[in-house]
Amino acid sequence: MIVSRLILKNWRNFRSADVDLGSRVFLLGPNASGKSNFLEVFRFLRDIAKQGGGLQKALSERGGLSKVRCLGARRYPNVEIEVHLAESEGRPATWRYAVGIKQETRGHRQACLDYERVWKGEKQIVNRPESADLDDPQRLTQTYLEQINANAPFREVARFLESILYLHLVPQVLRHPDSFSGPEISGDPFGRNFLERVARTPSKTRDSRLRRIETALRLAVPQLKDLAFTRDGRGVPHLEAVHRHWRPKAGKQREDQFSDGTLRLIGLLWSLLEGDSPLLLEEPELSLHSAIVTQLPPMIHRIQRQKRRQILISTHSPDLLSDRGIGGGEALLLIPGAEGTEVALATSLREVRDLLDAGLSIADAALPHTAHPEMKQLSFLE
Ligand SMILES: Nc1ncnc2c1ncn2[C@@H]1O[C@H](COP(=O)(O)OP(=O)(O)OP(=O)(O)O)[C@@H](O)[C@H]1O
Ligand SMILES: [Mg+2]
């Protein structure tokens, strides 16, 4: 299943957005245009839907409703999110889930539902507030999405949203998880528990995944071989590989000695191979050589052919976007303006469409549209 359409009102720096999404989506835009905020909507829904989550927790983890509500919101200040779910790209939506969130005007001024609606196909199966909600407004502080008793008729939606995975692996965090103590961040986006995740995977699956990763890794880091999972004397999980060098006896290295790019690539490949739920990738190009970055889109495409999972990728990389296999319908441009950021398919801009038709890549046709004119001024910094 994929999220085939996303409609937003007053979410972070999007006052309003309405976009169709395919199974592979590239998010392009200047710094602070809202690429991460766009991905954050999916994590927010996941945090509502997941066990032990819920609306209030998802909001408080983000600093409250006032932090997720668009600062530029006008007279109508409610935050609204609607997702359409389809079996695959180009198919009609089988589910629609919509939620409107407001702040109580009196009392504790808690965040609560303005509405919650669910459609299965054309039929609406949830339409809140219901009479019970009006009798007991406290009920509106929780979504049905988060309640096992209430979400039974649309459990499939809850499970799907709960399964969303986000990756923005930070090598230092993976290498030294103990140095980054403090409350855990939901979904472990930065890889603090990555090795635990690898450890929890059944050994047969784990070994076959590591073998596939090693094969792919050979292109990027040819001196590494025999990538394997191991535990130290204290039972702590590690990744280990043989580092070949000019001496006849090659030495073993653990993840704390792997390079940043090696670790990010391992994390990326592992996440791509793990599961078939939507995957949100934050700037996967970081720390990688351009020759490897150019290989990411075709690699993702190949994995999607087997797994049919949706992948959303934020990127600044011309190398990544130089792949001519990326269609204009797969690239979303985030264009900041006085009224918040606009989101548009690259092909919705005539000029971009013409350049793509003329055979240019998304990097050449669309990326220049995402630069502020003032950016050139940066070179005058004294
Ligand atoms: N509630 C809000 N209302 C309006 N704008 C907000 C809100 N919350 C965050 N922002 C703005 O969103 C911007 C950050 O967006 P985001 O982090 O998604 O950008 P990005 O495109 O991922 O940038 P980068 O490429 O630098 O990672 C900041 O300018 C921030 O001020
Ligand atoms: Mg970002």
Image (cartoon, rainbow, N blue to C red):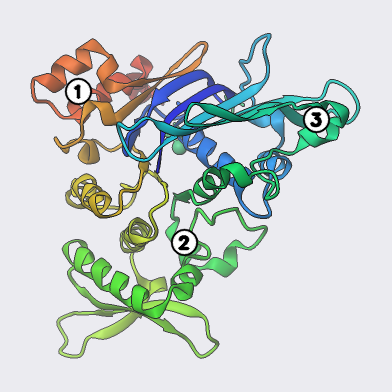
Q: Residues within 10 Å of mark 2 (few under 14, many from 20)?
A: some
Quadrant assignment, res 360: top left
For image coordinates 70% across by 49% down, the residue present is: 149
Q: Quadrant of the rendered structure where residue 264 is? A: bottom left
Quadrant of the snapshot with the N terminus: top left
Q: Quadrant of the C terminus?
A: top left
304 with respect to 323 (left or right): right
The residue depicted at 67 percent of the width and 59 percent of the height is: 182
Q: Is residue 221 visible?
A: no
Reading the image, the residue beneath label 2 is 172
Labels in figure, total: 3
Where residue 295 appears, as percent x and y from the top left, is 18, 49
Q: Nearer the viewer, residue 91 or 308?
A: 91
Amino acid marked by disc 1 = Ala
Residue 47 horizontal side relative to residue 197, left or right: right
Mark identifier at residue 133: 3
